[in-house]
C-alpha cells in the first residue's frame, strides 16, 4: 500500500526547499498560506504600480518642455507595464485579474500609501522619481531574489526600468537646484513634503509588522521593513547633499559607530490613517481608478467577443 504524504510532511519539504534556496514555481506544491500571502502582497504591488500612474499622469500635460513630457510619458507607461507583469505573475497563483480589480475597487486590497499624496508642482515629479522610485528599487532589488519564481523574474526587469525613473527624477531636482532661488525653493518644498511619506513606503516598524516573520521564513521578504528603510536613508542622504537639498529631519546625523544615519520618528498616526483610506487623496485616487475601469468596459467586452469568435 502506498504511504500517504501528510500535509505536515509536505510543509517540511517545502521549507527545506526554501532554506536551500530552491525557487518555487507555479505548479510546485505550496502551503495554502504561502499562496494567499503572495496573492495579497503581489496584487497590492500591482495595484500600486497602476494607481501610481495617477499622481504623475497629472503632470503629463503640464511638463515644462517637450523632452520632459516625452520622458514622463514613457515613465508612466512603464508603470502600466509593471502593473501588467505583476498581475500576470499573480495570476499564476490561481486568482484572475477581474477578482484582483474587484478587491482594489472595493477597498479590500491596499495599494502603496505614497500614492495618496498630491502632486502640487513640477518639482514633485522630480521627488517621485528620485525618492519614490528610489525607495521602490531598494525594496524590489530584494524581491528580485525572493522565493517565488514569477515574482522574482518580474522584479528583475522592473528594477532596470525603475533605475531610469530614479535618475530622471534626480536630474529634475538637480536642474532646479541649479536654477533660480524660486526653483530651488520649489525643489526643497517637494523634498519636505515627500521625504517622510517615502519612508512610510517600507511599511510599519518591524515590531508592528504582522506579516514579516512568516514572509521572511518563506524568503518572500529577505530583509525587514526597518532594514530596507535604513538602507534607503543611507543611500539617499548623500545624494540630497550633493545637490544642496536639506532632509527635513532635525535628528538626522551620521553615526560613525553603527556606520548608518540616525534619524527621527515617522508619524505613524499619519501612516495608519493613509492606509486605512483617510489620506489626502485616497477618495480621488479610487474614484479615478474605478472611473477608468468603467470607461474601459467596452474594450474588455469587445476583446472577449473577438476572442470567442476568432480564437476558439
Ligand atoms: N502602503 O505586515 P506588514 C512604485 C500594509 S510602486 C500601504 O509590514 P508586509 C511606483 C500591509 O499591506 C511599488 N499599505 O506587511 C509606481 C499590511 O496590510 P494587509 C510598490 C501598507 O506585506 C508608480 C499592513 O500594512 N511596492 O514603485 O509584510 C510610480 C501590515 O504591514 C504599506 C510594493 O508594493 C504601505 N506603504 O510588508 C512610481 C512592494 N506598508 O495587506 C513608483 C511590495 C504596509 O495585511 N510589497 N502596508 O491588509 C512589500 O514589499 C510589502 O508588502 C510591504 C509591506 C513592505 C509594503
Image (spheres, rainbow, N blue to C red):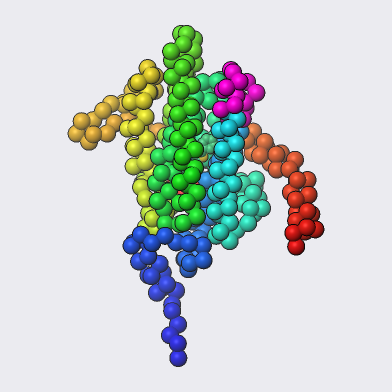
Residue beneath the point at 48% across and 26% down = 169
State the image coordinates of residue 85 (x, y, percent, origin top left). 56, 48
Residue most extreme to the bottom:
1
- The magenta region covers 56-71
State the image coordinates of residue 32 (x, y, percent, origin top left). 50, 65
Residue most extreme to the left:
257
Residue beneath the point at 45% across and 46% down = 156
State whether residue 151 is above or below residue 133.
below
Say left or right for 154 vs 22.
right
**Where, quadrant-wise, is the C terminus in this rendering?**
bottom right
Between residues 143 and 312, which one lies in front from this camera angle?
312
**Where, quadrant-wise, is the N terminus in this rendering?**
bottom left
Say left or right for 12 vs 117.
left
State whether residue 59 is above or below residue 151.
above
Residue beneath the point at 56% across and 59% down = 92
Q: Is residue 212 visible?
A: no
Say left or right for 256 vs 300.
left
State the image coordinates of residue 75 (x, y, percent, origin top left). 56, 33
State the image coordinates of residue 27 (x, y, percent, origin top left). 51, 66
Residue 290: quadrant of the picture: top right
Main secondary structure along the magenta-highlighted residues:
helix
Residue beneath the point at 34% across and 27% down = 237
Whether residue 29 is in magenta: the answer is no
Q: What is the count of numbered marks?
A: 0
Q: Is residue 5 visible?
A: yes
Whether residue 67 is in magenta: the answer is yes
State whether residue 31 is above or below residue 105.
below
Between residues 135 and 21, which one lies in front from this camera angle?
21
Residue 118: quadrant of the picture: top right
Amino acid at each position: 500500500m502506498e504511504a500517504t504524504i501528510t500535509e505536515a510532511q509536505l510543509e517540511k519539504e517545502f521549507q527545506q526547499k526554501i532554506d536551500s534556496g530552491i525557487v518555487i514555481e507555479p505548479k510546485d506544491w505550496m502551503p495554502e498560506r504561502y499562496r494567499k500571502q503572495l496573492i495579497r502582497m503581489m496584487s497590492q504591488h500591482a495595484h500600486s504600480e497602476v494607481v501610481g500612474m495617477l499622481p504623475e499622469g497629472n503632470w503629463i500635460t503640464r511638463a515644462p518642455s517637450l523632452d520632459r513630457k516625452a520622458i514622463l510619458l514613457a515613465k508612466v507607461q512603464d508603470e502600466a507595464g509593471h502593473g501588467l507583469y505583476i498581475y500576470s505573475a499573480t495570476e499564476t497563483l490561481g486568482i484572475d485579474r477581474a477578482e484582483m480589480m474587484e478587491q482594489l475597487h472595493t477597498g479590500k486590497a491596499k495599494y502603496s500609501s505614497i500614492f495618496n499624496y498630491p502632486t502640487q508642482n513640477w518639482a514633485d515629479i522630480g521627488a517621485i522619481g528620485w525618492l519614490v522610485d528610489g525607495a521602490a528599487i531598494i525594496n524590489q532589488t530584494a524581491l528580485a531574489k525572493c522565493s517565488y519564481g514569477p515574482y522574482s523574474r518580474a522584479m528583475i526587469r522592473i528594477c532596470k526600468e525603475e533605475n531610469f525613473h530614479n535618475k530622471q527624477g534626480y536630474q529634475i531636482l538637480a536642474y532646479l537646484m541649479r536654477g533660480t532661488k524660486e526653483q530651488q525653493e520649489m525643489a526643497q518644498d517637494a523634498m519636505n513634503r515627500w521625504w517622510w511619506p517615502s519612508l512610510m513606503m517600507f511599511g510599519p516598524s518591524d515590531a508592528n509588522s504582522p506579516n514579516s516573520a512568516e514572509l521572511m521564513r518563506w524568503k518572500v521578504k529577505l530583509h525587514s521593513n526597518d532594514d530596507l528603510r535604513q538602507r534607503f536613508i543611507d543611500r539617499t542622504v548623500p545624494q540630497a547633499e550633493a545637490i544642496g537639498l536639506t532632509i527635513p529631519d532635525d535628528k538626522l546625523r551620521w553615526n560613525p559607530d553603527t556606520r548608518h544615519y540616525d534619524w527621527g520618528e515617522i508619524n505613524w498616526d499619519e501612516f495608519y490613517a493613509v492606509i486605512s483610506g483617510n489620506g489626502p487623496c485616497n477618495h480621488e485616487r479610487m474614484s479615478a481608478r474605478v472611473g477608468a475601469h468603467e470607461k474601459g468596459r467596452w474594450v474588455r467586452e469587445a476583446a472577449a467577443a473577438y476572442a470567442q469568435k476568432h480564437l476558439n
